[in-house]
Amino acid sequence: MKVSFNSNKLLIQFILLTSLLSCKKEIAPEAKPLEIGIIEVLQQDVRLESEYTGQTFGQSDIQINPRVDGVIESLNFKEGSVVTKGELLYTIDPLQIQTRVSQAQGTLAESQASLSKTKSDLDMIEPLAKMNALSQRELIAAKEAYNASVARMKASTASLENAKIELSYCRITAPITGLIGISKVRVGDYVRPGAMTVLNTISDLGDVRVRFTISEQEYLRIFREYTKENSTLKGIGQSITLKLSDGSMYPQVGKMSFADRQIDPSTGAITFEAAFPNPDKLLRPGQYVKVGIVTDVRKDAIVIPQRAVIEMQGIYQVYVLAADNKVEMRVITPGPTFKDGYVIVDGLKAGDKIALGGTSLLKSGSLIVPKKINWLPGQDVTNTAQIK
């Protein structure tokens, strides 16, 4: 009986100890408020840019085409280098055309001899005909023979000049000073004249042309806004920006050159061209770029960072800081983007303080420790929210 009593006593003590330990585990520590970055809603004038995809072209892009057929005999330049106007680029084997020159020279010599003979005959017949020693028929025949010889002489001279011109085409020189590309032909290749045979291309990179298209609807909107009296878009064609394929901004500002005469009926867009200085020769023909043009100017616009906005099923919301350091969710109506921010149409006013968020633990009514952050559009903001 003594052993049984002691066993029961130990069992009761074990149960009580286990209950006490279990109760301690259920008591959770009090959660500390989140430290959240807070920015103040800005009100400022904004110049809204629209981006359009464009392609670069040289100031002049000249294709080098052969004008006579023959075998490429030599390449006299370094590919990818700058060549000067008049510099020898290619030579075509001139043997075939030199033969034509020789033939034309022979034909010309025969024509000269024939002309000399018919002229001598005419000079002899004319005085005899005047004295009626020869008939008028013989005089007319002599004149016709002379005139025919003159015509053959002119034709032979023209054939020789044409052959010499073709012979000069065997030496292909640079039409402009510029950067030459990779040759499409090599020594020994046979080429024929025509637009389809391109030997190379030379580009003048002094200024670079950028062509881009704007939809008809956008064109109409910009045109109507631009033609208004005292329009805020006046002069926008003098400050066009360029973004390169790596996301960097091109340091030079471009100017609008012209617009095409028509809307392309197949695409419903109109082509524009802008010119950009290229002092460092950074831009090359064929690059795809983003052209930035100011298409809207808004006075006293409300601007907030995009990362402060929460979007769910088409509804846009932000957390607004109240006086008691609690945040309340508010529905807003965002407008166009401006750099890394939104222009807000409705839901916020200047001076409102909003949370950057960045954590799923933030909810409407949450008590936070606000940490003020100074933000400007285009300035990278680091989320400083911490859980403590």
Image (tube, rainbow, N blue to C red):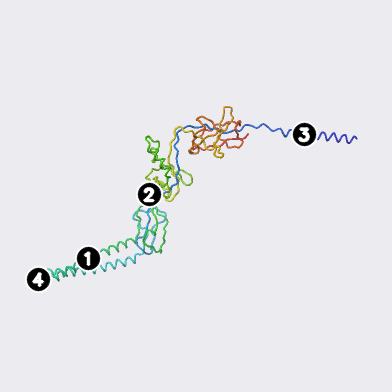
Q: Earlier in the sequence, mark 4 or mark 1?
A: 4
Local secondary structure at mark 2: strand
Q: Is residue 174 above or below residue 123?
A: above
- Image quadrant occupied by the C terminus: top right
On the image, the x and y values in percent for residue 361 come to 61, 36
**Residue at mark 4 to residue at mark 1: CA–CA distance:** 29 Å
**Residue at mark 4 to residue at mark 3: CA–CA distance:** 159 Å
Q: Which residue is mark 2?
A: 59
Residue type at mark 3: give it: Ser
Q: Which residue is mark 3?
A: 19
The furthest residue to the front: 265
Q: Earlier in the sequence, mark 4 or mark 3?
A: 3
Taking the image as shown, residue 253 lies to the left or right of residue 332, namely left
Local secondary structure at mark 3: helix
* Residue drawn at 47 percent across, 33 percent down: 301
Instruction: Please state which of the two labelled residues, at mark 4 or mark 3, is closer to the viewer.
Output: 4
Local secondary structure at mark 1: helix
> Which disc number belongs to residue 132?
4
Instruction: Please state which of the two labelled residues, at mark 4 or mark 1, is closer to the viewer.
Output: 4
Residue type at mark 1: give it: Ala
Q: Earlier in the sequence, mark 3 or mark 2?
A: 3
Dot 4 alpha-carbon crowd within 10 angstroms: few under 14, some 14 to 19, many 20 or more: few
Q: Which residue is mark 1?
A: 151
- Occupied quadrant, residue 365: top right
Residue type at mark 4: give it: Asn
Q: Earlier in the sequence, mark 3 or mark 1?
A: 3
On the image, the x and y values in percent for residue 17 come to 79, 34
